[in-house]
Image: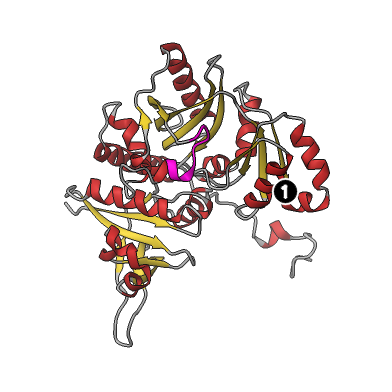
Amino acid sequence: MNPQTVVVAFGGVSPEHEVSVLTAMQAFAALSEERSLRLLPLYVSKAGHWYTGDRLKELSGYEDVDRTLKQASPCTFARSHHGRPVLRTERSGLFSRPEEHVIDVVLLAFHGSDGENGAFQGLCESWRIPYTGCNVLSSALGMDKVTAKAVCRAHQIPVVDEHSFYESEWEQDQAKIVESAEALGYPLIVKPVHLGSSIGVARAEDRDQLITHIEMAFRYDDQLLVEKAVTPLMEINCSVLGSTTDCRASVCERPLGSEELLSFRDKYQSDEGESKGMASAAREIPADISEELTRGIQETSRRIFTIFKASGVARLDFLVNADTGEYFFNEINTIPGSFSFYLWDHSGTDFRSLLLELIDLALARHRQKTGRIQSYDTNLLSQKAVKGLKGLKGSK
């Protein structure tokens, strides 16, 4: 039996590009001994170009990306003569022929922007290619913090009060926005709406800091969110794995940072290792919290996962008042850093098994979807049916 071809897609036009590369390298390492799989890299450069090649599966290749890309092959999705989706390399010479690799499933390892917001998922849908993780709807919803909070609020899931606005609104009436934000009460948290990994996130203690952080955050996104800070803050995360109708929660973790508000450096560049992605961050697993709080966060995580129609693996982050134990939904990461394998390791599922389950879930969803009727035969375009429709040539 031929091995399944798994295309690992990563990189992308995103401030979280390097984080995505680390996640993909971890996936290659975890599945390297799996003989039932053939792993192909699909690296999307910061300029948006697609490449494939064995060198792209090695972390050392990204120390000099330009040199590595000269050894790689530009590629694209295409269809074979039999109509199957393939990863096709482009010709590199006058007499060379493009190679075609049949795609069985795409393992998505993107973080942020076009890779995690539903855009690449939609591309896979249009090519009828199975892919891991959330669908277009839940991916887009998870990437938009404002809409995600609105959905949770509508389902009586606690969220922190916030004020959101666009850059155009900030340019037109800065004073009004500052006044609305200050009505929440300091300290305040400034966040880009469509980014993760704590990029652009900052805490403001007064008006000067608020304005400075807003101006900085607009470098990353055209829509921002200002929230009332939870104080004293304890962050608790939980991962959920499965489908919309059948999912389970992992143990909870408490990330530990150098400051109360976790930074990008806290998450990805701890002293324990700068090339381990989210796995290198300092954390307490399982989180040293009460059983009641643990159960509450796990149940709420599963509920949000279901409401968002999520699938695959996600990580849900909560803000907890360390004094009262009151918790608030913060965000859902539909492709979490390192696939949150470190949480599943403590929940009885190792990294290899986690990735294999993601692949199985993707294939099962694809079979279920393509097993439905995909077309509907009508005589709508017949001469009789279109007769009398205005604006159609020959419909008189």
Image quadrant assignment for residue 144: top right
- Return the residue at label 1: 166
- Which residue occupies the foreground of this view, 6 or 350? 350
Residue 245, how many percent across, how many down? 44, 28
- Residue placed most toward the observer, 177 or 273: 273
Q: Is residue 54 above or below residue 144?
A: below
What residue lies at 16% left-to-right and 51% top-to-bottom? Answer: 1
Whether residue 295 sits left or right of residue 167 in the image: it is: left
Left or right for 290, reference 382: left
Front-most of residues 160 and 351: 160
- Is residue 18 visible to the viewer in this orientation of the structure? yes
Left or right: 26 as drawn, with respect to 252: left
Q: Residue 244, relative to residue 111: is it above or below?
A: above
Q: Is residue 283 magenta?
A: no
Crowding at dot 1, Cα within 10 Å, few <14 / some 14-19 / many 20+, comes out as some
Q: Secondary structure at mark 1?
A: strand
- Evaluate whether residue 105 shows in this view: no
Give the main secondary structure, helix, strand or loop, of the magenta stretch: loop
Tell whether position 261 is magenta.
yes
For the record, the magenta segment spans 259-266
From the top left corner, tell me how far across and down residue 66 is, in percent: 37, 72
Q: Position of residue 360 (x, y in %)?
A: 31, 40
